[in-house]
Image (cartoon, helix red, strand yellow):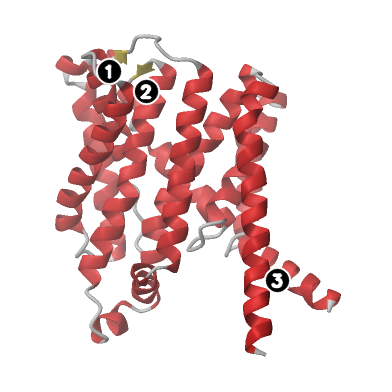
């Protein structure tokens, strides 16, 4: 019996690895086989959205607290990279520095806010993003409301591969976190904070670890966005939509799982693009109605129904 379980587990992991390797191989060779700028641009957008959704999931999906402040770290990363690139520093170095700056900021904010209860934490993180947007809007030294223009020293293929690499790194980190001791502690905290604390789990310590980790990737991604667009301004990079889209896509796919945000981003991102292309004046209304229906009928996301279908199919084969 034990041998059968081990073989089944190995077979399942082998199939997952083979599927992932196939998809990654296709994504790597796609720009050379079919170098269509529209497709590359769409995929870059999907990669960025996946990073933001996985980042939200790393903290909120596993620890239970909802953060509405990812736009703040995305914006900080965008501005940090833009300033560094305009100063002559390599974009790749600037992305790393932006990520480190995001982690430092997260450690500072987290040390103040992570002891708050859920609704107060949501309000504070939301307010922090709004405050930063107004600061940068009025900060003339970094362009103020006019924003910052970057030199067009990139190619779509370069942006594509750097964004793809960042997304894959974020997904792997989330997967490893889910299987790690820290991930198990975070899930225990999410399910019952008082019981977890009674068992000796340091709630504040593990939440701040997850918070800092989850803020690294949005900061790097903000830098990638600035490099790609060659122009940023406060209303764009500090927009609350950055955080809301991450929440929506993660919730639709399934919180607390590494695969959920990927599914949510891929499906909703594709639907949004199709609606925008065919119904440019009504797509937001259609999209909103679709999301309301999804929340009503799939409150726990797609991942659980899919797991049930796969499990049922496996049982039927036996």
Q: Which residue is mark 1?
A: 85
Q: Nearer the viewer, residue 301 or 201?
A: 201
Left or right: where 114 falls relative to 298: left
Q: Which residue is mark 3?
A: 308
Q: Quadrant of residue 268?
A: top right
* Rendering coords of residue 161 (x, y %): 50, 29
Left or right: where 29 falls relative to 64: right
Q: Residues within 10 Å of mark 1 (few under 14, many from 20)?
A: many
* Rendering coords of residue 137 (x, y %): 24, 22
Does the image show residue 135? yes
Q: Quadrant of residue 315?
A: bottom right
* Rendering coords of residue 317 (x, y %): 85, 74
Q: Quadrant of the C terminus?
A: bottom right
Could you tell me which secondary element the residue under label 2 belongs to?
A: helix
Whichever of labels 2 and 1 marks the residue nearer the N terminus, that label is 1
* Rendering coords of residue 284 (x, y %): 60, 34
Whichever of labels 3 and 1 marks the residue nearer the N terminus, that label is 1
- In the rendered image, the residue lying farthest to the front is 3
Q: Nearer the viewer, residue 16 or 36?
A: 16
- Which marked residue is nearer to the observer: mark 2 or mark 1? 1
Left or right: where 22 falls relative to 105: right
Q: Quadrant of residue 116?
A: bottom left
CA distance separating discs 2 and 1: 10 Å
Q: Which residue is mark 2?
A: 226
Which residue occupies 27% across, 18% down? 85
CA distance separating discs 2 and 3: 41 Å
Q: Dots 2 and 1: beta carbons under 8 Å?
A: yes
CA distance separating discs 3 and 1: 48 Å
In the depicted structure, whether residue 264 falls above or below residue 175? above
Which residue occupies 24% across, 59% down? 208
- Which marked residue is nearer to the observer: mark 3 or mark 1? 1
């Amino acid at each position: 019996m034990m041998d059968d379980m081990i073989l089944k587990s190995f077979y399942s992991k082998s199939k997952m690895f083979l599927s992932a390797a196939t998809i990654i191989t296709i994504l790597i060779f796609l720009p050379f086989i079919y170098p269509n700028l529209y497709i590359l641009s769409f995929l870059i957008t999907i990669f960025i959205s996946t990073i933001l959704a996985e980042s939200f999931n790393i903290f909120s999906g596993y620890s239970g607290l909802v953060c509405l402040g990812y736009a703040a770290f995305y914006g900080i990363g965008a501005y940090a990279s833009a300033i560094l690139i305009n100063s002559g520093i390599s974009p790749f170095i600037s992305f790393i520095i932006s990520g480190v700056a995001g982690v430092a900021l997260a450690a500072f904010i987290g040390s103040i806010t992570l002891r708050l209860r859920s609704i107060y934490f949501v309000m504070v993180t939301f307010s922090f993003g709004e405050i930063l947007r107004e600061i940068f809007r009025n900060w003339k030294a970094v362009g103020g409301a006019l924003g910052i223009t970057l030199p067009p020293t990139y190619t779509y293929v370069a942006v594509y591969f750097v964004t793809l690499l960042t997304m894959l790194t974020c997904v792997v980190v989330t997967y490893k976190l889910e299987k790690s001791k820290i991930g198990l502690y975070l899930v225990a905290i999410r399910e019952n904070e008082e019981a977890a604390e009674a068992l000796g789990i340091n709630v504040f310590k593990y939440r701040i670890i997850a918070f800092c980790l989850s803020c690294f990737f949005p900061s790097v991604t903000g830098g990638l966005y600035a490099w790609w667009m060659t122009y940023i301004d406060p209303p764009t990079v500090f927009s609350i939509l950055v955080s809301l889209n991450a929440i929506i896509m993660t919730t639709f796919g399934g919180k607390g799982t590494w695969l959920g945000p990927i599914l949510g981003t891929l499906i909703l991102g594709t639907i949004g693009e199709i609606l925008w292309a065919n119904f440019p004046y009504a797509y937001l209304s259609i999209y909103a109605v679709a999301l309301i229906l999804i929340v009503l009928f799939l409150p726990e996301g797609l991942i659980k129904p899919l797991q049930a279908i796969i499990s049922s199919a496996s049982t039927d084969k036996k």
